[in-house]
Image: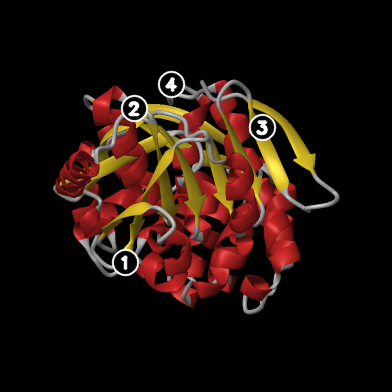
Amino acid sequence: MFYFCSIIQNSLSMNLSIDIKNCSRVVVGSAESLLAQMLPNKRVIVVSDTNIDRHYHALLERYDHILIGLGETSKTLHTVDNIYRRFIELGVDRSCFVLGIGGGIVTDVAGFAAATYMRGLEFGFVSTSLLGQVDASVGGKNGVNVDGYKNMVGTFCQPKFVICDIDMLRTLSKREFRTGLAEMIKSGIIADAELFAMLEECDFETLQRNPKTLSELVFRAIKVKADIVERDERESGDRRKLNLGHTLAHAIEKSSSKMNHGEAVAVGLAYVADAAQRGGLLSAEDKARIVCLLEKAGFELTPPVEMRRLLKEVKKDKKSEGDSIFVVLPRAIGDCVVEKMPLEEFKALFK
């Protein structure tokens, strides 16, 4: 079970951490020093990707390691099957510890493989992308796609720790850095109006090179997610709020390869904000602030395919139940509501 307990700022190391009672800790700090403190006295098997190996080979080569490919096309059961086979070749057993080092795809795949191999191995993450740090690596969801449908197979299983090293974000392309901003903006809309306001004041051109400000923003976004997951680990209530903008985003990702996850989420956020405003739930001022911030962050807010095509994919979204779907709508910046509505009613919001 994932329980948010406390926030600690160590004045000496300047690490920011969220303690997860009986289970895990999320720490914003240096991976190099924190791994020495946090890795258990076990044989460590690293799962990473070829890009991380290129940038941080000296870190990976300390351990037996398995590399996967890049992008959503690697987030599949086929990749997991290859990891299982490599585990067998390496003699991995329940006395081992799996360490995922990479972005959200790596941590999703590594966590799923660890949670299911031999009915479960201990695992932890070093999250190296902004998207992974503020969303994908935190919360205990681990899974893969099936036929392009997002996260259709997976587990709820908490890592022992997640290390978020801000310095590792320096190697991200501008596009990859921006994709994490969408999830950060989403966190502000859901439950932290102050975070949203801080983002409005940011210079996004220099943020990637501003570790002090970036650490605070990342930590606030993680706290939003930790607070929600504490109340609802398995997504039966409040955790559904974390899907704000994701129903249309997943349909975009299924229908087109032109947008990455964060870019698709940005489109979903803009369209849901518009629907909430037209329905009288969200003020015109707050809707304008949301759209303005997304545009300021550099997002294109027009979907790459027709809305008619996207709405055909919605029924296969994992948030649907029968002929209904759980929809997250903003009521104000910092406040969202989850509504279960018939699919046809949902589709009517965007026609």
Q: Quick one: which residue is furthest to the right in this view?
A: 11
Q: Is residue 293 visible?
A: yes
Look at label 1 and name its amino acid: Thr
Q: Which dot, 1 or 4, sits closer to the camera?
A: 1
Label 2 packing within 10 angstroms: few (<14), some (14-19), many (20+): few
Q: Quick one: which residue is furthest to the bottom in this view?
A: 205
Q: Which residue is mark 1?
A: 50
Q: How much space separates mark 2 and mark 3, taking CA atoms?
A: 25 Å
Q: Which dot, 2 or 1, sits closer to the camera?
A: 2
Label 1 packing within 10 angstroms: few (<14), some (14-19), many (20+): some
Residue drawn at x 43%, y 36% as measured from the top left: 123
The answer to whether 166 appears left or right of 248 in the picture is right
Q: SS of the residue at dot 1?
A: helix
Nearer to the camera, 142 or 45: 45
Tell me, for residue 19, which label it has, or none.
Answer: 3
> Residue 116: x, y in percent?
27, 29
Q: Which residue is mark 2?
A: 94
Tell me, for residue 236, which label it has, or none.
Answer: 4
Mark 2 or mark 4, which is nearer the start of the sequence?
2
Residue drawn at x 59%, y 40% as measured from the top left: 38
Q: How much space separates mark 1 and mark 4, taking CA atoms?
A: 36 Å
Look at label 2 and name its amino acid: Arg
Label 4 packing within 10 angstroms: few (<14), some (14-19), many (20+): few
Q: SS of the residue at dot 3?
A: strand
Q: Is residue 298 visible?
A: no
Q: Which dot, 4 or 2, sits closer to the camera?
A: 2
Look at label 3 and name its amino acid: Asp
Q: Are marks 4 and 2 in contact (CB under 8 Å)?
A: no
Q: Are marks 2 and 1 in contact (CB under 8 Å)?
A: no
Residue drawn at x 68%, y 47% as measured from the top left: 220
